[in-house]
Image (spheres, rainbow, N blue to C red):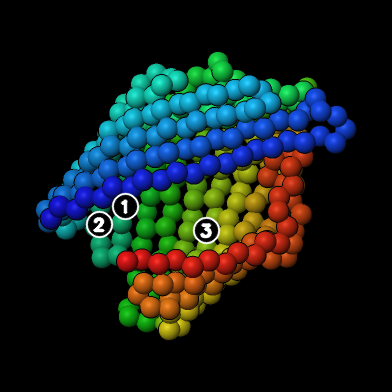
Amino acid sequence: MLETSLQLSRSSDEVIGRDPAGGFNNSDFKTQIDQLTWQNHIDMDAVSLLAGIDMYRSKGYSASAILDKSMTQTAGFASLAWSADMVGINASVRYDKNSVSQNKTTYKFGVALHPLDGLKITANYGTGFKAPSLNDLYFPASAFSSGNPNLKPESSKGWDVGLAYQVGDEDLKAGFSVTWFEQKYKDLIVWQGPPPTFFYSPVNIGQARTQGLELSGDFSYGPAYMRVNWTYLDAKDSLTGDLLPRRAKESGYAALGATWSGLNIEVAEYVVGPRFSSAGNTKLMKGYQKTDVRLNYAVNKQWKLTARVDNLEDKKYEEVSGYGVLGRAWYAGVSAVF
């Protein structure tokens, strides 16, 4: 069976800074992103093949900084998966051609074993590549921040091993999974700022490493379900031993929900531990908790109504030191599939 898809998308964002104390810190930066993805999937019983191209163009404009820059990236990718009763193997490769950095080939290989009914053991190894964004390179300079046109692309190598078990019948289902992972980075792109200075700018960290443990579980009975997740993360600059900024050692969530006659409601509690906002183990930020509520109603096969409330308790917290997040926020939407 052959299945092909073509996706076109455009998105834009505009960042405007206004300093009432004076115009020296005023700034504007608009980014427009156009993307085309063509994907082809061939499914032949035990073998599955996916191949395609991904074209990406980002354009940045700033009237205040007299800036007009663009970046293009074209990638070809392919993946192959094979599965039998007790084993599954997958492999993928991707080639990226980028207008502002070096071209790069990345790959991934994985294996899954099913020695017992409901039990799965996995192992994966792969490489990664991330070119600096237009914001990273050319964000307009002000008294307190600036992009860095000398940034190098970020590359990584990583592996993980995991174990998952699922059991249940038509009404009652339960499962858990545990995964250990490790990732090593070269030229990791990180925005750094005060202290010791009052200036924010992206830099490359020569070598960095993240490793940790992720636990997750799910339980459902009839229309009700519960999902939990907890992650322990050790993320450090390999050269200095300092913790990487804005990466909590512990984080997790718990979600309770139920579905009746097309109506789904879910309440989720998120917990994020303390972490440093800046390099060098500086600018400590407190941990926080927040609650989100989501509702979805399928009117029919084509139309769906959605609503959600983020930060239900109107908590005040920061993900970056000095930058507060939205308080309680309400959203509603309508979607259709034809």
Q: Which residue is mark 2?
A: 114
Q: Quadrant of residue 45?
A: bottom left
Identify the disc placed on residue 293: none
Could you tell me how far apart the alpha carbons at marks 3 and 2 are, in whole angstroms? 23 Å
Does 11 sit above or below residue 166?
above
Earlier in the chain: of badge 1 and badge 3, it is 1
Tell me which residue sits at (65%, 38%) in the image. 15
Coordinates of residue 158 in the picture (x, y in percent): 41, 34
Q: Quadrant of residue 102?
A: top left
Q: Is residue 257 visible?
A: no
Earlier in the chain: of badge 2 and badge 1, it is 2
Coordinates of residue 282 in the picture (x, y in percent): 74, 31
Q: Is residue 142 visible?
A: yes
* Kind of residue indicated by mark 1: Ile
Q: Which residue is mark 1?
A: 121
Earlier in the chain: of badge 3 and badge 2, it is 2
Q: Which residue is mark 3?
A: 229
Tell me which residue sits at (53%, 66%) in the image. 333
Answer whether labels 1 and 3 touch (C-beta < 8 Å): no
* Kind of residue indicated by mark 3: Asn
> In the drawing, does residue 175 fall left or right of residue 305?
left
Quadrant containing the C terminus in the rendered view: bottom left
